[in-house]
Amino acid sequence: MRDTILNILAEIVEDVDFDTCTTLIDDGLLSSLDIIQLIGALNDEFDISIPATEIVPDNFNSVDAMVAMVTRLADE
């Protein structure tokens, strides 16, 4: 799952070290448009629905946070 999310992120934004960065939102590395694209891609790839209540910086600041969110939503 982690590698899939890394690939999705690399398609949306180039030249960012997504593997180690933990401040993707806080440092402005992902724009609001990037987040919209990312949500759509995650929904499609993992057959989940990310509700508005989950669209918070803590869930998108790092790949690990995204993995945790997707895992949690997939288990519901």
Image (tube, rainbow, N blue to C red):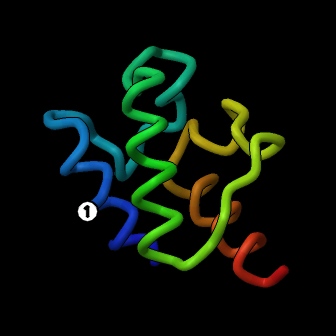
7 is higher (above) or lower (below) than 28 = below
Identify whether 72 is placed above or below 51. Answer: below
38 sits to left or right of 65 = left
Q: Quadrant of residue 15?
A: top left
Return the x and y of residue 4 as percentages of the image width and height. 34, 72
Q: Residues within 10 Å of mark 1 (few under 14, many from 20)?
A: few
Q: Position of residue 11 (x, y in %)?
A: 19, 50
Dot 1: what SS? Answer: helix
Apparent side of residue 47 relative to residue 58 in the rendered image (left or right): left
Number of numbered discs overlaid on the protein picture: 1
Q: Kindly indicate the quadrant of the structure image that contains residue 76.
A: bottom right
Q: Nearer the viewer, residue 3 or 33?
A: 33
Which residue is painted at 15% across and 37% down in the image? 14
Which residue type does callout 1 highlight? Answer: Asn
Name the residue tied to disc 1: 7
Q: Residue at x 41, y 21 (%)?
A: 31
Residue 35 spot, x, y in % from top left: 47, 36
Residue displayed at 70% across by 61% down = 69
11 sits to left or right of 37: left
Please state the horizontal and vertical placement of residue 72, each as a whole percent of the image: 77, 71
Give the residue at the far bottom of this rendering: 75
Q: Quadrant of residue 5?
A: bottom left
Residue at coordinates 47% horizontally, 23% vertically from top-left?
32
